[in-house]
Amino acid sequence: MSNGSSSPPPGGGPLESLGDWEDFVVSRYPEAGSEPADRQKSSGENFRDYRAEARACVREFYRLNHRHQTRDFVRAKKHEFLRLERREMSIWEAMEFLDTLVDDSDPDTDLTQLEHLLQTAEAIRRDGHPRALILTGLIHDLGKILCLFGEPQWAVVGDTFPVGCRFSEKIVFHEFFDENPDSRTREYSTRLGVYEEGCGLDRVDLSWGHDEYLYHVVKPYLPDEALYPIRYHSFYPCHREREYEFLMDDRDREMFRWVRAFNPYDLYSKDDRPPEVARLRPFYEELIAEFFPPKIRW
Ligand code: FE
Ligand code: FE
């Protein structure tokens, strides 16, 4: 249902905190063994009605996201942001800049963005993964600075999905795509849409957000093992639901190993004890310097 206007609303959004979206993702993909036994029993064949459980602000967030993320919108945002003409900052400066993002959430229960990044990186480090993957944990959400550039929540976070071909029914809140004009565009409504079988995900436009933006910022400096999780960590329809694999090429299939290795650290590393930033900083400054020049373009 359209009200006749497809222009997106101005900045801000319905979520109290960007973490509301991440909490909802964790509720959909609980860590193995973390669900209460009664919930597991009542859920029958692992079925839970996430839509019924989602808070109203989360529903509204997805409604806006699915309605406004059209192929034209994605291409316009790439044109607008990927020239990287906004700032020059070091990685650590970008982390501190992101940490100025103040949500309306409860500061006692929600982690700051900086704390989430450090906890993710520390969990990867504890498990002995390569340094590039530790660095991925440290930086993977820096694209959320899009919020500080005035972008609305639904154009910064949310599960990502291809535009220009049919929206998979396994995308959460699929019904909200009824309001997306691309659903009524014949060229975009077939399984392949504008793409070719096995064309490779690099040729596919995914819905716009913090993943794609950061990928382009850091692309010159990092190996694929880091770039794939950065670019596709919110692509739940693919790395969790196994949809859209017909768009992948051999390299994508090989590298999604790293997307899947990374995802649990992003979702399940949250810890109430805040990381000791000052103590950890020297290790991470050295890690950053191993891959990045002192300043990069954003
Ligand atoms: Fe993220
Ligand atoms: Fe994250």
Image (cartoon, helix red, strand yellow):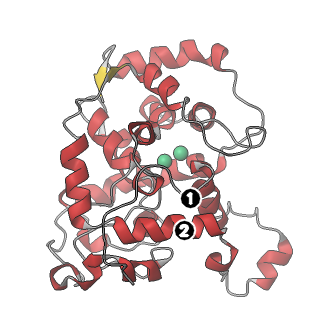
Amino acid type at circle 1 is: Pro
Query: Residue type at mark 2?
Result: Glu
Q: Tell which of 270 and 32 is nearer to you.
A: 270
Is residue 255 placed above or below 29 in the rendered structure? above
Circles 2 and 1, Cβ within 8 Å, touching? The answer is yes
The tag on residue 60 is 2
State which quadrant residue 248 falls in. Answer: bottom left
| Placement of 245 over or under 210, stated as above or below | below
Residue indicated by mark 1: 14
Compared to residue 142, the image places residue 259 above or below, namely: below
- Confirm whether residue 41 shows in the render: yes
Q: Position of residue 30 (x, y in %)?
A: 67, 63
Dot 2: within a 10 Å radius of its alpha carbon, few (fewer than 14), some, or many (20 or more) residues?
some
Q: 195 left or right of 158?
A: left
User: Which residue is nearer to you in this view: 100 or 164?
Assistant: 100
Between discs 2 and 1, the one toward the N terminus? 1
* Gap between marks 2 and 1 measured at Cα: 6 Å
